[in-house]
Image (spheres, rainbow, N blue to C red):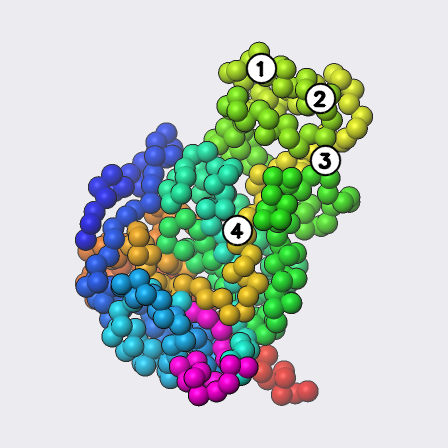
Amino acid sequence: METDTKANGVASAGPATESARTIKIHKPTETDMRHYYENFLPFNLIFQWLNHSRVPSTDFTHREFAFEHQNGAYQRYNSFSDSADFKKKVCKVNPTRFEVGAIYPIEPKNRKSVSKALMKPLAKEMVLDIDLTDYDEIRTCCKGTAICDKCWKFITLAIKVVDVAIKEDFGIENRIWVFSGRRGVHCWMSDPRIRVLKEQGRRAFIEYLDILNVKSKGKKGIFGMKKPYHPHVERSLDILKEHFVEVILKEQGTWDSVEANKELVQSIPDVRLKNALLAKWKDLPQRTSTEKWIDIGELHDELRVQSFDIVDWRKEMILQMLYPRLDVEVSRQMNHLLKSPFCVHPGTGNVCVPFDPSESEFDPFDDAPTLHEIFTENETDWRETKLRKSIELFAQYVEGLQETTAKREREDLEF
Ligand code: ZN
């Protein structure tokens, strides 16, 4: 194993040095991966999760899995007959990771025996992908694959905003959040009626959540939103507003630099105010983001600007900076595959562990063990390792999901 010594031993540091924490990196070897698959990865639970019961059904046998091989090759359309077959094949192939796809009318491995028209996906979990890469234009603390305590707050807030919306607005009960192993999280939703959503329904679902729509609105942002705001927008604002000063103005210091002045005033619709602000800050190059934020309100009043509502502008600015940025393509397409829970991130060696955000905030620096840590704790028994908590949480979740599915099937029979 390659060890990144810098990353070790700082996880328990106090608040003063908290921002120095980085993700643990301990790249696994091929031998590590095989050992992990043979002894630790909970294949039977993954099987039950995707199968929705204990006896193999087409929800599992007709399910597509993709392998990412050690040489980088990507192989789609694998399928397995049961939990034992699943484990046997994964251990044999020893991929760097495997991904979960949709359920098809036939076993995906036999797709060549039928016409292409028959290989249309029938069902799949609804998934969400939130990744710090999509925050690169607004985070100032890290770039690329790096993350720290400061920018992980974007993810924590995103989970808060999205989780309540999926639960309250869509009534989804069966959902599990999973760390992606480096700089993001996935959410898998398995309620029976959401699994059968067609692409149009998936698009509507994700468009409801994706209010920033960064890809099409880009730098123009969401300013001038229709009022009154949608209840989901108001609720999101309630969650996000108390973090704006700390996260954006203080920690990120998004507009601290002189170069950022133009960016900050870009969304102000009043030219007179815009120019007055730029002139003021030109003379004060040391002005912090917090001071600039206050200047905007003060000059707005001083100049008696009538052309726009400053309170609404502030709200929209908070949304623009802190509202979740979603990788919508992952959610939209039914045949899109996503890395399975409990896979290992090949670049960091971190296990992609499930977590429950309603219990506590997920800490990527401490809550996701690396293979190295697990093997050090115990060579073969997951119960004796840090993995125990996540496996037990997942087992409990899968049990609940099976109960919901069974209940739903009973209800269907009664009609
Ligand atoms: Zn950071």
Q: Which residue is mark 4?
A: 159
Please tell me which of labels 1 and 4 falls first in the chain: 4
Numbered label attached to residue 312: 3
Q: Earlier in the sequence, mark 3 or mark 2?
A: 2
Label located before the other in sequence (3 or 4) = 4
Task: Work out whether residue 55 can be spotted.
Answer: no
In the rendered image of this protein, does residue 92 appear above or below residue 1?
below
Q: Amino acid at mark 2?
A: Leu
In the picture of the structure, the residue carrying the numbered disc 1 is 282
Whether residue 127 appears in magenta in the rendering, the answer is: no
Of the pair 276 and 128, the residue shown nearer to us? 276
Q: Is residue 19 left or right of residue 333?
A: left
The CA span between labels 1 and 3 is: 26 Å
- Res 391 quadrant in image: bottom left
Q: Which residues are magenta?
A: 100-117
Q: Residue at x 62, y 48 (%)?
A: 216
Residue positioned 62% across, 54% down in the render: 209
Where does the image place residue 45, in percent across and percent down from the top left? Answer: 38, 72
Q: Which residue is mark 2?
A: 273
Asked whether residue 196 is in view, the answer is yes
Point out the tag, 1 or 3, that comes first from the N-terminus.
1
How far from the left and from the top, in percent, is residue 387? 31, 60
Q: Are marks 1 and 2 in contact (CB under 8 Å)?
A: no
